[in-house]
Amino acid sequence: METHQGLTASSVMKSYRLSELSDAELRGLKARPRIDFSSIFGTVNPIVEDVRVRGDAAVKDYTEKFDKVTLDDVVVCVIDLPDAELDPAVKEAFDVAYDNIYAFHVSQKLPEKTVENMKGVRCKRITRCIGSVGLYVPGGTAVLPSTALMLAVPAQIAGCKTIVLATPPSRDGSICKEVLYCAKKAGVTHILKAGGAQAISAMAWGTASCPKVEKIFGPGNQYVTAAKMILQNSEAMVSIDMPAGPSEVLVIADKYANPVHVAADLLSQAEHGPDSQVVLVIAGDGVDLDAIEAEVSKQCNALPRGEFASKALSHSFTVFSKDMVEAISFSNLYAPEHLIINVKDAEQWEELIENAGSVFLGQWTPESVGDYASGTNHVLPTYGYARMYSGVSLNSFLKYITVQSLTEEGLRKLGPYVAKMAEVEGLEAHKRAVTLRLQEEHDAEEEDVPPCFEVPAEDSPRSTSSNKRGSSTSTTGASHSKKSKSAYFNMFRSMVKQNSEVSGAKLQMMKERQAEKKMKEQQESTQHEAVIQCALEAGIEPGSPEYLALGYLCGSAIMTRLFFKCQTPEQRIAFIRRYMKAENLD
């Protein structure tokens, strides 16, 4: 096994040194265990189809088969259920959690804003809730009323009219009293007493007693995940929150981290199940790895779910990184569900984090607070999906509709550009939807024609003269000519006015962009000068490798901000040299 600063890693977790791994080995390290969904789909597909056809009867049969529970009613209305009786201390804990979760999620509401892109062209985005949602609360190896809060509270804030919560029933067919308490408090309307693929199917298709929902949320095992994946691509017309995999945590620890705390954080995820993913990243030298692994073994043996944790640890690993930059770089590659940064001055590294479901900064922030009551949501992307998915939030229960409104003046300004683009794409009807409106307005105008466009009347001297020369111009012809020239004049005048206004708008836009560019260049120049001045004051000689490296450092906004966080000359010199080493500038 790997040795680190004279310490020998125990057999609890495998260990690797990042600097010694090839690209292929690094890719293998970030990969999660493969899930063979082909065989799982083969099991789940018949359940999905059976529930579609037989509805409640199928749900009852599968609940009896898998959960050994015989149900009288598949769905109950929450309003008809008596209040759950909880121990006062338990009730208070859930009340505090509810308040914090509510406060954090209600703060995510955004005001509607109207933007006038051009004069007479107004655009905005309006918010509407998803009408009916399904919330899945697992109940297999552990009862999770906290998940009921995490899913129901944002649905309540969003204003969803129908909220169906599915959870496996107890052996006597009842609902877990803690889940019921949280469901009532957070506005759940119906409870489906079922779990697994049959519960997901009932919410997606709808049954005689279960309302059909439009989006399904919540974690679950492989069969629940498979059902969600199948149904979101079916005629059920239902969407899901995100793909899901086993729970996972990545802990970054330095020499200042308490081994007892590090071990406890690792085990808090390992106890979820034997397929949980647990990763420890050692940042820099001086970490007492023996003490951490001794604590892992000691605490694991004392856990009621220690067997689950032990199996999870058997396929987990430790990696050694030279510093925090390399440690966070690996974390971004791994994209964990939970990221714990248990290092000195943890907050300064927040800006480097790119991929994680939820982050826990500092020695006083265990992952457990996010799981229960800090206010953030614990339904998070796993399996590396944090690279492209976010955790559940208020936005998950909302949809956004864009609205635009134009005045006649607005269409006159914007219309020619739209018509030209439609012409380029060969969509004539699109073009005419604009040009016909503009032409109708021209034809409808009844303004007087200036003298230079007037057609002489028949009794005018010029008209008489013309008639004497044999002109056959009639009154009707003169009237038609007058109308035609009036239309041409108005069109010409409108085009001149329109082009003048568009050119003015373009000129103003160019001026604003030039001003912004100039201001940005001035700010960057001032910032670069400040970096160089600080470096010179720290004792760096002009022309030295450190001095030359400043040009590269100043090119990164993040590195520049981190440089200014260094308080002493020694810290600044050390930071520059670490940066040079990381970028191979030394």
Image (spheres, rainbow, N blue to C red):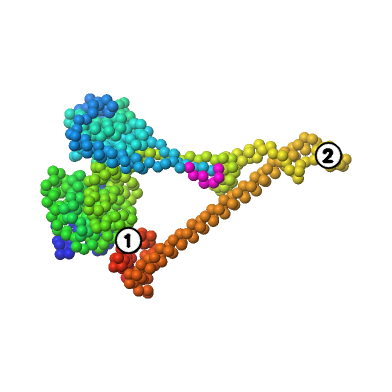
Q: Amino acid at mark 1?
A: Lys
Cα distance between the residues tagged 1 and 2: 88 Å
In this image, 454 relative to 70: left or right? right
Residue occupying the point 25% across, 40% down: 97
Q: Is residue 139 visible?
A: no
Does dot 2 land on a helix, a strand or a loop? loop
> On the image, numbered disc 1 is attached to which residue?
565
Q: Quadrant of the C terminus?
A: bottom left
Q: Is 192 or 445 nearer to us in this picture?
A: 445
Identify the residue shown where x is 26% and y is 52%: 361
- Specify the segment rendered in magenta: 114-120
12 within the magenta span: no
Residue at x 27% of width, y 33% of height: 185
| Amino acid type indicated by mark 2 | Ser
Question: How many labels sit on residues?
Answer: 2
Crowding at mark 1 (Cα within 10 Å: few <14, some 14-19, many 20+):
few
Q: Secondary structure at mark 1?
A: helix
Residue 189: x and y, percent? Answer: 30, 30
115 is within the stretch colored magenta? yes
- Relative image position of residue 187 (x, y in whole percent): 30, 32
Left or right of 291, for residue 20: right
Report which quarter residue 372 is drawn in.
top left
Q: Position of residue 508 (x, y in %)?
A: 55, 53
**In the rendered image, which residue does mark 2 sit on?**
460
**Relative vertical location of residue 530 with respect to residue 159 in this rendering, above or below:** below
Q: Is 526 left or right of 484, judged from the image as shown?
A: left
User: Which secondary structure type mostly characterizes the magenta part of the structure?
Assistant: strand
User: Which comes sooner in the sequence, label 1 or label 2?
Assistant: 2
Quadrant for residue 86, please give it: top left
User: What residue appears at the point 38 percent right and 41 percent down from the top-left corner?
Assistant: 109
- Considering depth in this image, is 105 or 278 the residue closer to the camera? 105
